[in-house]
Image (cartoon, helix red, strand yellow):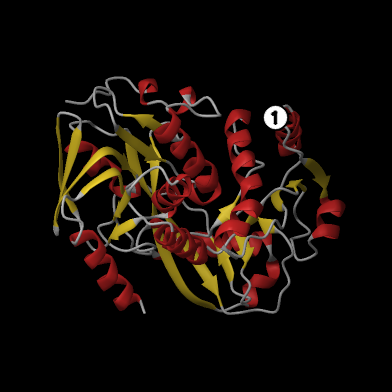
Amino acid sequence: MWYRYLVNQWKMVNHKMDNLFDVIVVGSGVIGSSVAYHLSESKKHEVLLIDKGFPLSGTSGSTQAWVWVHSKTPSWYGELSMLSAELYPFLEKKIGDVEYKRTGGIAPFFNEAERESALRLAEKQAEVGIEIEVLNREEVLEKEPSLSPEIAGATFSKIDGNVNPFRLVELYVKAARKNGVHCSFYNPVNDIEKSGDIFQVKTQKGSFRSKKIVLAGGPWSKELGKMLGMDMPVKQVRGQILVTEPLQPFLKYTIGGIRQADNGEVLIGYSKEEVGYDRRSTLDVMQQTARMAIDFIPALSKANIVRCFSGIRVMPEDGFPILDEVPGMEGAYVIAMHSGITLSPLIGTLMTELLTEGETSINLSRFSLERFNGIQSR
């Protein structure tokens, strides 16, 4: 099926004789595919989605896929995540079942000293409408009996949950194609040039032209930025995940670092390592991750680990999303962030507003490249 799909897409793109599009989106992960889909909804743009690999071959296919809100700080960042999470039920009605579940989220703590921080978090997040409960040990164990009796308490919010990242990205792309988006996969971008008001995107399979371009390359954002003569303020951060054998359902909530999938597997991990684009799993981090899991949920000590994997996040230097037009390069836009699963419905919506109307319903000044010193393009 996918072979026929690729052949048909190749024919669609290569039989467009002028190869001129309104918008080219580079990167078909959860952010790029969301942008392409939301742009296609407007029916105002002819869009080409390009990727060096295939949807889900990068970060979006190697993630725990939380839709996590309540502990995102400062509060304006938590609010952004909340607004995006609120879009998921509507998104499912449009593109299909992405297995979004608003399970509620628990973030345990192990000593009473952390309770004060939890109370401050709840107070600040309430200012933007994020409801958080600070629970004592008994209240946490009543909600999630499998958690360790050694915990002191936890923060809890109903808004957190998770999604199936494979279905999410697949359905974004399918819906975008249905709306007329052209796709060119397994097609690395080699260079980007601008002549007048037209961008020329040179790829392994030929050149394409567009009036506007959106760079959503995830871990490869820095390389794409260099093609526009800019030093993208991002880094690559590895996260390693352990996966257990399928277990009988026993976790009701999404827990900070741990969740149980529909098939019974438990996904464990929240490591952060700056090691470049290295997707190997390492014994030391695997052991640390296993210890964390047992500290949280003692019964996991009896579970077999059946596989492990690593994903590479794109992490802006200050940790917060970038969504902006490239300075000195009108019509070129950059999107780079971790937490792409959580933020994709909102980011796709905002990027469509920006490209279609020239303004957005949410002030994006916090996500500007101007906050980094020395960012400029040729």
Residue located at (59% from left, 40% from top):
81
* Image spot of residue 205 (x, y percent): 14, 59
Pick the quarter of the image with the C terminus. Answer: top left
Residue 277 horizontal side relative to residue 285, left or right: left
- Dot 1 lies on which element? loop
The amino acid on which the numbered mark 1 sits, given as a three-letter code, is Val
Foreground pick, 298 / 176: 176
Q: Is residue 361 left or right of residue 24?
A: right
Which quadrant of the figure has residue 331? top left
At a point 62% along the width and 36% down the height, the residue shown is: 78
Front residue of 264/342: it is 342
Q: Is residue 375 left or right of residue 136?
A: left
Q: Position of residue 41 (x, y in %)?
A: 48, 49
Q: In percent of the image, x 45 and y 65: which residue is there? A: 170
Q: Position of residue 355 (x, y in %)?
A: 40, 34
Question: Which residue carries the number 1 mark?
Answer: 128
Residue 299 lies, with reference to residue 338, above or below; the image says below
Looking at the rendering, in which quadrant would you find the N terminus?
Answer: bottom left
**Position above or below: 233 against 38:** above
Total numbered labels: 1
Who is closer to the viewer here, 153 or 52? 52
Q: Where residue 350 sits in the image (x, y, percent)?
A: 49, 36
Residue 285 seen anywhere in this rendered image of the structure: no
Residue 371, quarter of picture: top left
Q: Is residue 102 something one can see in this rendering?
A: yes
Label 1 Cα neighbours within 10 Å, binned few <14 / some 14-19 / many ≥20: some
Q: Nearer the viewer, residue 107 or 151?
A: 107
Residue 155 versus residue 302 in the image, above or below: above
